[in-house]
Amino acid sequence: MMPIQKMYINGSWVEAKSQKTREIMNPFNQEVIVEASEGNEEDVQAAISAARKAFDQSEWKTTPANERGKLLYQIAALIERDQEELARLETLNTGKTLIESEADMVDIAEVFRYFAGLADKNGGEMIESPIPNSISKVVREPIGVTALILPWNYPLLQAAWKIAPALAAGNTIVIKPSELTPLTTVKVTELIEEAGLEKGVFNLVLGAGNIVGQVMADSPLVDFISFTGGIETGKNIMTSASGNLKKIALELGGKNPNIVFADSDLETALDQALNAVYFHAGQVCSAGARLLIEDGIHDWFVEQLVVRVKKIKLGDGFDEETESGPMISAEQRQKVERYVDIGKEEGAKLLVGGKRPEDPTLANGFFYLPTIFSDCTADMRIVQEEIFGPVLTIERFTSEKEVIALANDTNYGLAGAVWSTDIQKAERVANQLRMGTVWINDFHPYFAQAPWGGYKQSGIGRELGKTGLEEYTELKHVYQNTQPEPLNWFKS
């Protein structure tokens, strides 16, 4: 009998009340890995109620911050202890290469350690009162019940970005991984239980986003919701959350420009252009899916890029020679195929890829060849809309002013990069890009100490960094009159 992944509600591992399950598939070969409990509204309400009770009635929110920090350090140590198993689960469930999953586990442990160290350094501040004989201070308190909704591309990494600050601040949690990729979130829940967190503080619900996530967004018992995923779902969550004015944080992806000037280190820029867009089969919110190349080097750069792209090794994430794995699902691959058709219809020139691989060893997986479109213009849908797959669009520019306008000409503003050996020029351009992260002569690095999030429709709020902890807190002003006396305003 196939094992069933259970949910974790109020300190107990439970199956869905409906007894329904969902098959969890390996995207490399479509083999069923496990069955997962398929939660419904009743399960979510139970988890929310447990989190509400734990926040309102337990001692968790008043636990000293340094004690919460110690708990997070312990979780980080447990992740490091089991990082090999976690990495294998991540590759099995997402299809990404094992080396990438292993790197993710190192980053995930570091995120928990970072917020562990920050937990007792977020206590607020004294402010000078203009009123005599008074003391005024601003303190930060936990928001309350936090609902955390995860994407399928980086399941455990995104979980860490949310769980660590939520617990560091003293909140309670209801978390929902993607219905496609729950395995590592279930495993880390086991580690959190092992660390000794009291019941009700952390709750895991599995199931479809349009059911589980919708209940979270609608519930008046939830104080804060953090979502990473698609823009349309984000809009729906924002609309639902407005019904009770709960706080929200949304990371909704991007259409990220990668700008290459003629005076760049071209070999490095070329190599990084591949990493920018084809890492994890292009299923990265910060993927450099828009390549903007200065006119003087455009033809050479594109020619070399095509040569390199044709050599990308697709395969099983557990194969050491694999450079890129499959896409997550048949549905996601079909979405990419629709956009490739759109690109052709719009007049973009297909240079390479644009189809499924013919290699019979890849036939059972959700593979799609790395694809390049040239002769693209800013008004094309393939340039404006997030494809979330291994598709690169190339645009040509002739001046700083033009490329800044092109780069900013989307509804997104998550990230971008500028390549040039003229650092003053690179900084001028970077300063005018309306994006939450801009890399100069690099692409993709992030770390726990720096905030992550976007401008415009890339989202609301920030994760990581000090700001990432503050998202999970409320500000309170406490005023004390040290010499109270009657005002005698009313004479009678």
Image (tube, rainbow, N blue to C red):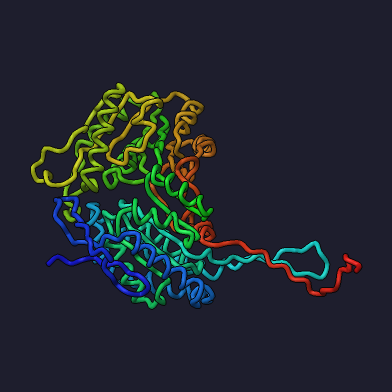
Determine which quarter of the picture holds residue 350. top left
Q: How far from the left and from the top, in percent, is residue 285? A: 37, 45
User: Which residue is pictured at 28% across the width and 55% down the height?
Assistant: 179
User: Which residue is pictured at 51% across the width and 67% down the height?
Assistant: 169
Q: How far from the left and from the top, in percent, is residue 103? A: 31, 58
Q: Nearer the viewer, residue 271 or 345?
A: 345
Q: Residue furthest front?
A: 492
Q: Residue furthest top?
A: 347
Instruction: Give the left or right position of residue 334, taking residue 160 as reference.
Output: left
Above or below for 111 versus 302? below
Above or below for 303 versus 107? above
User: Which residue is pictured at 48% across the width and 67% down the height?
Assistant: 171
Q: Residue furthest left?
A: 360
The C terminus - image quarter? bottom right
The N terminus - image quarter? bottom left
Query: Is residue 148 something that shows in the picture?
Result: yes
Q: How far from the left and from the top, in percent, is residue 432? A: 53, 36
User: Which residue is pictured at 38% across the width and 47% down the height?
Assistant: 444
Instruction: Give the left or right position of residue 472, taking residue 75 as reference.
Output: right
